[in-house]
Each structure stands twice: as structure tokens, then as C-alpha cells.
């Protein structure tokens, strides 16, 4: 490695995780608010699907918090992976709906 950084206190790890959680939460809320302001319609439903998918991925990221250290690693990994899979499927579905409209199908 070019730089060898020791983080015995886990401070850098927690700052990094906290930053990622804050950004993920804020962007999920922004997309959800954007979808609600559309008052339905195709773009509103696409943004709502995106925000649900983003929120599920955010919840998967939340499982990295030390709060969940006492729970068996296998259960945490299964929950995280399931949230990620469903979240990405929803965002893919939203992108597919948008693409169909753009193509005129």
C-alpha cells in the first residue's frame, strides 16, 4: 500500500459510514419529494420507485452500524443482500418504465 493508516479507534471508519448514511438518506428524501411533487403520472411513479429502491439500499447500509454487531453475521448479511437486491430491482424497473416512454413503446 502507498499509505499505511492505522485506525485503531475506528474513528475514520465511523466518519466514512456516517457520511455515506447521511448522503444516502438526504438523496432518498430528495427523490421522494420530487416524485410527490409530480402528483402521480409516469415521472412521479418512476421517481417513487427510485426513492423506494434507494431507501432499501440505504437500509442495507444501515446494517453496517455497530448497533447490529451483536446479531449473527449471517442474518445481517442476508438482510443486507436482500435489501440491496430488492432496491436495485425497483430502480431497474423504474429505469425500464422511463426507457419505454422515451422510446415511445
Image (cartoon, helix red, strand yellow):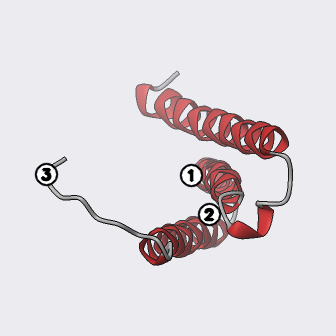
For label 1, the SS is helix
10 Å crowding of disc 2: few (<14), some (14-19), many (20+)? many
Residue beneath the point at 17% across and 58% down: 3
Q: Is residue 31 above or below residue 60?
A: below
10 Å crowding of disc 1: few (<14), some (14-19), many (20+)? some
Measure the C-alpha gap from mark 2 to mark 3. 44 Å
- Which residue is disc 2 drawn over? 35
Residue beneath the point at 79% across and 62% down: 68
- Which residue is disc 3 drawn over? 2
Please name which of the two marks, 3 or 1, marks the residue nearer to the observer: 3
**Mark 2 vs 3: CB contact within 8 A:** no
Decide if residue 77 is on the left or right side of residue 42.
right
| Mark with earlier residue (3, 1) | 3
For label 3, the SS is loop
Q: Quadrant of residue 75?
A: top right
| Mark with earlier residue (2, 1) | 2
Decide if residue 82 is on the left or right side of residue 14.
right
- Which residue is disc 1 drawn over? 43
Measure the C-alpha gap from mark 3 to mark 1. 46 Å
Question: Percent from the top left, x then y, of residue 26?
Answer: 54, 75
Please name which of the two marks, 2 or 3, marks the residue nearer to the observer: 3
**Mark 2 vs 1: CB contact within 8 A:** yes
Outermost left residue: 2
Q: Is residue 22 above or below residue 94?
A: below
Q: Is residue 87 above or below residue 19?
A: above
For label 2, the SS is helix
Residue beneath the point at 68% across and 62% down: 62
Amino acid at each position: 500500500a502507498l499509505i499505511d493508516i492505522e485506525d485503531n479507534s475506528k474513528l475514520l471508519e465511523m466518519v466514512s459510514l456516517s457520511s455515506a448514511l447521511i448522503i444516502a438518506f438526504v438523496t432518498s428524501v430528495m427523490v421522494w419529494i420530487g416524485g410527490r411533487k409530480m402528483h402521480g403520472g409516469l415521472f412521479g411513479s418512476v421517481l417513487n420507485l427510485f426513492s423506494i429502491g434507494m431507501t432499501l439500499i440505504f437500509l442495507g447500509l444501515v446494517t453496517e452500524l455497530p448497533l447490529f454487531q451483536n446479531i449473527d453475521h449471517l442474518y445481517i448479511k442476508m438482510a443486507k443482500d436482500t435489501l440491496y437486491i430488492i432496491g436495485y430491482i425497483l430502480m431497474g424497473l423504474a429505469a425500464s418504465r422511463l426507457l419505454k416512454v422515451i422510446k415511445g413503446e
